[in-house]
Image: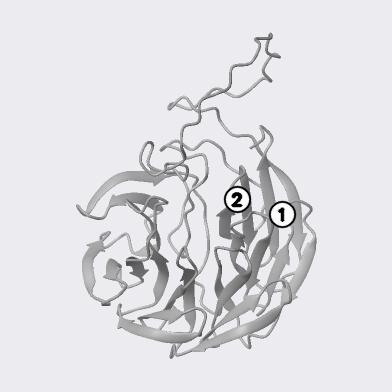
Amino acid sequence: MSHPDRAGDETSTDDDAASQTTEDDPQVPERTEPQTAPPPPPPSAPPTASGRERPHYELRHTMRGHTSSISAVKFSPDGTLLASCSNDRVVKIWSPFTGELIRNLTGHSKGLSDIAWSSDSVYLASASDDTTIRIWDVDTGITTRTLKGHQDYVFCVNYNMTSTLLVSGGCDGDIRIWNAAKGKCTKTIHAHLDYVTAVHFNRDASLIVSCSLDGLIRIWNTTSGQCLKTLAEGADAICQHVQFSPNSKYILSTAHDSAIRLWDYQTSRCLKTYQGHINQKYCIAACFSVTGGNREIVQVLEGHTDVVVAVATHPQQNMIASASMESDLSVRIWADRGGQ
């Protein structure tokens, strides 16, 4: 990862009503229990404008070991592991609950820009400046596939929800779609005129969203490779990162004008703009949290001593992982003291 345009930031935000990760959960009626006097609630901060109680994230663990700038952190879908990758060419697997280093995944010959977990938390894909993507068996630390085809640095990678496909974006401007089991490229899309900085499947993998330093967000048909829509954030707002919301109805983007935006991509309309952080240089990522949110800043987490270059939210709990550039080089775990 020799390019300075990769970094991370976090927002635990979502469309207030429409894009919760729990949107399809059935509403289970509560059982009737004998009524007893409830214990007094612990003191809490004033609620947000939406009525939600403010979080109380506290630093739980500080993990060190990377020797060069960290580019991504990702929780496994089952929530038991955290992976981090770095310009030092190493993927590290951690316990987010104890802060213990479990395993190093080594094999790439140049720095790493991105990682992605398979949905069963068994495999991890890593994207490298050595122009390859490696698929790792996390338990054994063995590379099961090496995907070759990009002509330049591979900047971003993601699985679809069933983990049958991978999508990657490179500094050559191409998007490649791969058969994950065979490690074979099934389609190459000449997508952008500059670095492809993010790629993401929607929920059923029928669509891919991408963005690039050419300033454009594009929606692609996965099967045909056809560009279905192009969105532009404006001359002062070059898009750095983009992803579908959990229900795939919206797109969340970050840009060089220090804003995070929620889009209705079918109407090309920006629904919400989130502001508060400052970023005019790095490719920051934004995350959805399991609790949703609004346009308020509900908490600022402080502790890193250099630019925060990566962030991830836990799939089940109110837990955040963050990581920083040189000279900090730490991965930090933050948890809400109010519980899950």
Q: How many marks?
A: 2
Check the picture and name the quadrant holding the N terminus: bottom right
Q: Whole-percent x and y of residue 167? A: 43, 74
**Crowding at mark 1 (Cα within 10 Å: few <14, some 14-19, many 20+):** many
User: 311 above or below 149?
Assistant: above
At 36% across and 82% down in the image, what residue appears?
174
Q: Earlier in the sequence, mark 2 or mark 1?
A: 1
Q: Amino acid at mark 1?
A: Pro
Q: Whole-percent x and y of residue 306? A: 63, 59
User: Is residue 316 among what the camera can see?
Assistant: yes
Query: On the image, which quarter does residue 336 sit in?
Result: top right
User: 78 above or below 275?
Assistant: below
Residue 325 or 264: which is nearer the viewer? 264
Q: Are marks 2 and 1 in contact (CB under 8 Å)?
A: yes
The mark found on residue 17 in the picture is none
Residue 221 or 68: which is nearer the viewer? 221
Q: Amino acid at mark 2?
A: His
At 37% across and 61% down in the image, what residue appears?
204
Q: Report how far apart the C-alphas of labels 2 and 1 lie in the structure.
A: 9 Å
Q: Whole-percent x and y of residue 182? A: 50, 85
Taking 210 as reference, is 5 left or right? right
Please tell me whether mark 1 sits on a helix, a strand or a loop: loop
Q: Which residue is mark 2?
A: 314
Taking 335 as reference, is 262 left or right? left
Query: On the image, which quarter does residue 243 sit in?
Result: bottom left
Query: On the image, which quarter does residue 212 sit in?
Result: bottom left
Please tell me whether mark 2 sits on a helix, a strand or a loop: loop
Check the picture and name the quadrant holding the C terminus: top right
Q: Whole-percent x and y of residue 9? A: 52, 55
Q: Which residue is mark 1?
A: 96
